Amino acid sequence: MSRNAPFFLLNSLCAGLLACGVLTGARGETPSANAPISSLPRVVIVEDENATEAFKPRPEVVRALVQRGITHFTGKAGVGEAWRSLVRTQDVVGIKVYSTPGPQVGTRPSVVAGIVEGLLAANIPTNHIVIWDRQLSDLRQAGFGEVARQYGVRLAGSLDSGWDEKTFYESALLGQLVFGDFEFQSNEQAVGRKSFVTKLLTTNVTKIINVSPLLNHNSVGVCGNLYSLALGSVDNTMRFEGDPNKLAQAVPEIYALPALGDRVALNIVDALVCQYQGEHVSRLHDSVALNQLRFSTDPVALDVLSVQEINAQRVRAALALASRTNRLDLYRNASLLELGSADANKIELREVRKAE
């Protein structure tokens, strides 16, 4: 699909999302390993009402939920076998988290701990497992340093790893360069039209497990799989932030870079808690504990379902209609680039609410 294809707003899809109560697929059932293969994007949701207590994750329950999710998604009997169906022992697996908001609002360390345990069960060496985000400082403040020490795995920041001068996203939009951007010191005009990809991806990580929270974003609906990976992997991002139209075009095109999208083995939504207002600021009074994890290889389908969930929670909270997002053109654009499905009515959804 050409990147010059016209982009359209999704007002009609937004209305469909709000009205949609039933998606294709079985609810509350365990998928059979011999079930026919569907051409629809598949999302598996696992749920345990005991996964959180007063919005705080219960680590043992969460780790068991990760195990249940990966085995149901892959159809494999064992955890190690399930992860080996997605990554190889020689891969360097980067677990991409969203750490900027901290452990209560961003990706939760207990979810990542469950993923690390599964990768170790799959015989992935500890030095081949990297927990990463844009900045090391954010990772440490969010509690991921403790997870890395506990399991002996690596911690890395895309900014701290440096930028690859040969791999970049270029657009006509000029951005004000800041300290840390690749061209900051060499560009006398202090503006640039290129966003360079982190060396962490171009020279090290070969497979990505993308883990994003169910957290609203004021410009694009959700701090989801597309947004988190795209803007966490490149520099010169200030030219996109704060403008829904710019983000809607740039995020899918950055995600589509081979160094990013082609390396994603699995997307997971940390839906233990859904915060539907507040963006990066923790607002427990605008949150609801869903006690869920959501698994898919389709980042667009997951993000669309996340926007649907956020809107549904805003309806339940009797918030003003104006607070519900209709900024869904990012996901339509991603669909045009064949990154996944933006049609909520064409998703094979399976919910597994009880452990076997």
Image (spheres, rainbow, N blue to C red):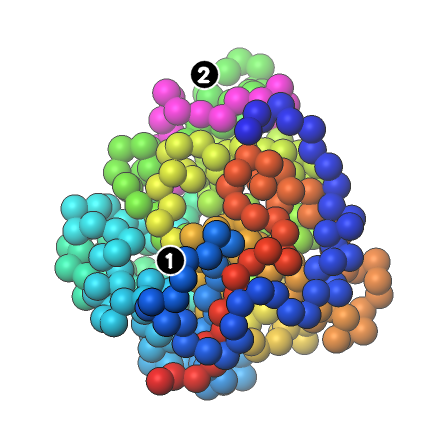
Tell me the quadrant of the picture where the C terminus can be found. bottom left
**Image quadrant of residue 273?**
bottom right
- Please state the horizontal and vertical placement of residue 17, each as a whole percent of the image: 70, 60
Q: Residues within 10 Å of mark 1 (few under 14, many from 20)?
A: some
Image vertical order of residue 340 relative to residue 193, above or below = below
Residue at 51 percent of width and 54 percent of height? 40
Q: Which residues are magenta?
A: 158-175
- Asked if the residue under mark 2 is in contact with the one under mark 1, i.e. CB atoms within 8 Å, the reply is no
Residue beneath label 1, please?
A: 140
Q: Is residue 191 left or right of residue 156?
A: right
Residue beneath label 2, please?
A: 186
**Who is closer to the viewer here, 78 or 148?**
78
Q: Is residue 309 visible?
A: yes
User: Is 105 a magenta residue?
Assistant: no
- Please state the horizontal and vertical placement of residue 73, each as a whole percent of the image: 38, 65
User: Is 166 a magenta residue?
Assistant: yes
Residue at 56 percent of width and 48 percent of height? 341
Upstream in the sequence, badge 1 or badge 2? 1
**Who is closer to the viewer here, 15 or 247?**
15
Q: Is residue 57 left or right of residue 199?
A: right
Which residue lies most toward the top here?
A: 188
Numbered disc 2: secondary structure: loop
**Image quadrant of residue 161?**
top left
Question: What type is the residue that disc 1 sits on?
Answer: Arg
What numbered label is drawn on residue 131? none
Q: Is residue 117 visible?
A: no
Residue at 74 percent of width and 63 percent of height? 18
Question: What type is the residue that disc 2 sits on?
Answer: Ser
Residue at 75 percent of width and 65 percent of height? 19
Numbered disc 1: secondary structure: helix
Image vertical order of residue 240 relative to residue 327, above or below = above
**Who is closer to the viewer here, 142 or 67?**
67
